[in-house]
Amino acid sequence: MRRTEAREAVRMAMFLNLLHRWESAELNQAEAAELLGVTERTFRRWTRRYEDDGETGLLDRRLGKSSGKRVPPDRAAEVERLYRERYQGFTVKHFHEHLVKDHGFGWGYTWLKLHLQWAGLAPKAPRKGAHRRKRERRPLRGMMLHQDGSRHQWLEGRALDLIVTMDDATGAIYSAFLTEEEGTASTFRAVKQVFLAHGLPMSLYTDRGAHYFHTPKAGGEIDRGHLTQVGRALEQLGVEHIGAYSPQARGRSERTFATLQDRLVKELRLAGITDLEAANAFIGEVYLPAHNARFAVPPAGEGSAFTPIPGVDLDEILCVEEERQVGHDNCVSYRTLKLQIPESPMRPHFVKARVKVHLYPDGCHAVFHGPRCIGRYDENGTIKDAKNAA
């Protein structure tokens, strides 16, 4: 027996019992209606219908009729066709968002999920595992940023690294781009985007990758006495660098990548994008605003922990910086290049002086003696200009 039929049978039995007790003057109509859970007016109407038509008159007249809110068969068929032909592999939630936004679909997510499961197009969600207590978010924006990279087939048939920098307090992604390989250069590129747009955060939370930390033993303790280029730059800027010791500790960013691997790949495919440059433009201009509007949450506290940095030349900090000694020929040997020190009013030559060489993301170089730049060079080591102190 269907549940609605069973409920009708129970309601019928209760009404007949109370009707008999009313007819025998054991109850008045108000008391009978209260026990039945309806108004006195409804009890009188049911009594008249029973007198006129018997038990048939008490049947719910909605039974056997289609609901006015039911999805029309042609619309349901169109939904199945769209999923098979255009949105194959999308999660139900992601598919529902596109139906509402792009196809004028006015019915709810629950109906869509049950319909796709009934049609065998979407699997039922597996049972969740044991509950884990999540770390509380930082209360203010800028108190902690997460940065990580994920190797995945982001573009059709092409494995790339997606570098994401997000806020712990809100889950908003401030920077995301695809690159051939994660490393020091991609880290500097990402944090520069964020620092210029928002200011300096209080801390940056990352894994213990070789470009973030020196770890003498694989999976071991971080050696804080030997900074990487990233560690040196963050120390110069006064940003605390926190290293995670397990993937579970970075659960917030791990869950974000799970969402991105599901949604971003499909959005890029839907837009017909196969080129790296076009993909990064799409991510920055189209995907991230929509993602943050959908998934970011308001911070627990008011205000911001970001520190403005007007006047700070980030290019001279977010670069590879290495110390060298000037040779007898007044040149600096750096990797495969010979960087000739130009004439300077500071001193006749710089032979045997300790200098610092800056390597910028565009491949250009600069040589510093103390705080002063004494030469700038292109990627081939040719002098571009000399900036000397008076």
Image (spheres, grey):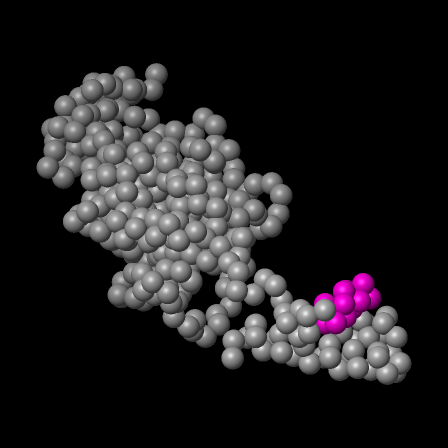
Residue found 43% across the figure and 51% down from its top: 72
Residue at the limit of the structure toward the front, as seen here: 52
The magenta segment:
40-51
Above or below 291: residue 51 = below
Residue found 54% across the figure and 53% down from its top: 68
Residue 82 included in the magenta stretch of the image: no
Q: Is residue 123 left or right of residue 303?
A: left
Quarter of image, res 92: bottom left
How many numbered markers are drawn? 0
Q: Nearer the viewer, residue 307 or 104?
A: 104
The percent coordinates of residue 117 (x first, y second) are 37, 64
Q: Is residue 331 left or right of residue 5?
A: left
Residue found 78% across the figure and 78% down from its top: 19
The percent coordinates of residue 387 (x first, y second) are 29, 20
Q: Nearer the viewer, residue 265 or 159?
A: 265
Prevailing secondary structure class for the magenta stretch in the rendered image: helix
Q: Quadrant of the C terminus?
A: top left
The answer to whether residue 37 is seen in the rendering is no
Q: Is residue 259 left or right of residue 3?
A: left
The answer to whether residue 306 is seen in the rendering is yes
The percent coordinates of residue 91 (x first, y second) are 36, 56
Residue found 51% across the figure and 44% down from its top: 142
Q: Nearer the viewer, residue 105 or 199?
A: 105
The percent coordinates of residue 199 (x first, y second) are 47, 36
Q: Nearer the viewer, residue 225 or 111?
A: 111
Above or below 254: residue 290 = above
Above or below 305: residue 223 = below
